[in-house]
Amino acid sequence: MSQDNAAKITLSGVRKTFAGGRKVVLDHVDLEVGKGESLVIIGGSGTGKSVTIKCMLGLLKPDSGAIYIDGQDVTQMSEGAREDINRQVGMLFQAAALFDSLPIWENVAFGLLARKMCSRADARDIAAEKLRLVGLAPDVLDLSPAELSGGMQKRVGLARAIATNPEIIFFDEPTTGLDPIMADVINNLIVHVNQEIGATAITITHDMVSARKIGDRIAMLYDGRIIWAGSTDAMDHTDNPYIQQFIHGRADGPIKMAVRR
Amino acid sequence: MMNPLRPIGRAFIAFLATSGRLAAFTALGVSHCFRPPFYGRQLLRQIIEIGFFTLPVVGLTAIFAGMVLALQSYTGFARFSAEGAIANVVVLSITRELGPVLGGLMVAGRIGAAMAAEIGTMRVTEQVDALTTLSTNPMKYLVAPRLIAGTVMLPLVIFVADIIGVFGGYLVSVYKLGFNPSNYLQNTWEFLEPMDVISGLVKASMFGFLTTLMGCYHGYHSGGGAQGVGKATTNAVVSASILILCFNYILTLLFFSKDVAG
Ligand SMILES: Nc1ncnc2c1ncn2[C@@H]1O[C@H](COP(=O)(O)OP(=O)(O)OP(=O)(O)O)[C@@H](O)[C@H]1O
Ligand SMILES: [Mg+2]
């Protein structure tokens, strides 16, 4: 495993509420991600997985608690310092969030151009290369995002997230909406980015096949807390009823889905 | 029993909170206009959007405003045989008031709505968040270029509109009311002072700033979904229009206070 002892990201007692405190999404989240580690966050729909990574990215501000990246508390940082931290991250949004006023290649190369890492001509070549990694042919380069299917947009979002070779990458449901074969291509890509390039990866997924393949460690979010975290092997052997229910996808168990009739 | 003062107090606090948020947004947006990096492509896009694509609608507004002014002042002034003043009335009304105000309102409808819809859509589809994760400050990338383009380009658009409006008045006066063309033009120039035009252009600049500010502010704070974006768009147009009318009065008072007092 590529895990290292130093923690890259640490969440300690993170609390996040909405609607003026009436809606508690994250109650008290403690979580540690090692440098070079691949962590998978699982949990029911609407439990706050996306909110958790948005807090790590600084897109949402926790009500209380601290988030350390490389030992620095990013919740207390100035905007400028926060921007410096963001230079080393990449993010794949759940709904891709491509810029619909820009062609595909500029979407993929956006981070490179924003960080002035290369010229526009080179950026286009890099974009073509990254698109190839996610299984897209160069003929999409000049299309606009609206001309692509949902799964293709997702893959462009992935190419954009990895284009700058970030040290920390967040993937919000990378394989949702893809066929099983393409899902496996993406899983391999994430493993590659994590193991060969050495990036710390944090992935949200509902897809247990994908979770097993890309995760060094799995953490489960339930009711505003991380109720279980451990290696992929440990997950299969734990008798934690929440984990068992979730990985086997049973409707009966301690996790009660809010089903309204 | 419910305290009757409570809703009033709550509304007042909400008003203060909104004003504070708007003031902070304005200060931040303006400060980003002066701090690098600057996004030239974005600025150019907005300059073309405001400076070029609003010309037809503003030009049409101006020409009809000029034409109707000539017609109205003719029928009105004929009652006390002051038809000679038509040229002055047209040029002063257009440059000082109708050019900037009518043009500004048209631009508020066109540009304010477009900006609120675009930025609002970007907000609800998380494109604004995506900018942040790609080392790009959304205030600098989205808001600053729009504020600059609005403030700089609207005076140019309104200057063109002034000319078109005066021309509209000329058309009606010469071809419909039978004025002598050279007399009419001479009357137009004779009493026109630089301040008349300049005050109108300063107003236009202010209106351009207010319109783009409202478009950006409401888009930026747009709520979820298509409904949220729709509401942001409506709010942008309505608030920009009201602010334009408000500031028009204030600026007029500032420019011509000595004429009023004297
Ligand atoms: N900006 C917001 N304002 C109000 N509530 C929000 C906001 N963002 C998220 N929430 C709420 O927080 C909860 C968790 O949302 P989140 O998007 O993190 O879920 P999730 O775990 O990612 O679910 P899914 O697997 O369906 O993507 C939801 O109930 C959602 O309604
Ligand atoms: Mg989510």
Image (cartoon, coloured by chain):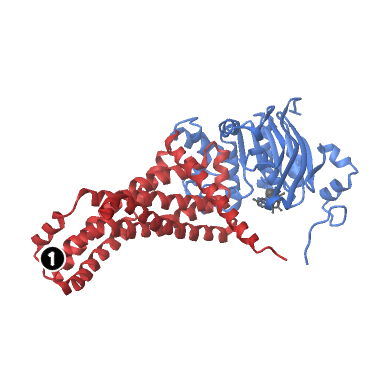
Q: Is residue A87 visible?
A: yes
Q: Is residue A135 visible?
A: no
Disc 1, ligand 1: is the CB inside 8 Å? no
Which residue is at the front of the view, B28 or A16?
A: B28
The outermost residue toward the top is A5
Q: How many numbered circles does the render carry?
A: 1
Q: Residues within 10 Å of mark 1 (few under 14, many from 20)?
A: some
Which residue is found at the position 42% from the left and 51% from the top? B210
Instruction: Where is residue A187? Give x, y as percent.
Output: 69, 41
Which residue is at the front of the view, A168 or A134?
A: A168
The outermost residue toward the front is B262
Instruction: Where is residue B142? Give x, y as percent.
Output: 47, 45
Q: Quadrant of residue B226?
A: bottom right
In this picture, residue B68 sits left or right of residue B148: left
Which residue is found at the position 22% from the left and 56% from the top? B163
Indicate the chain coloured blue by its letter.
A
Instruction: Where is residue A101? Give x, y as percent.
Output: 47, 49
The chain that hosts pointer 1 is B
Indicate the chain coloured red by its letter.
B
Q: Quadrant of the C terminus of chain A?
A: bottom right
Q: Which residue is mark 1?
A: B84
Q: Quadrant of the N terminus of chain A?
A: top right
In this picture, residue B42 sits left or right of residue A168: left
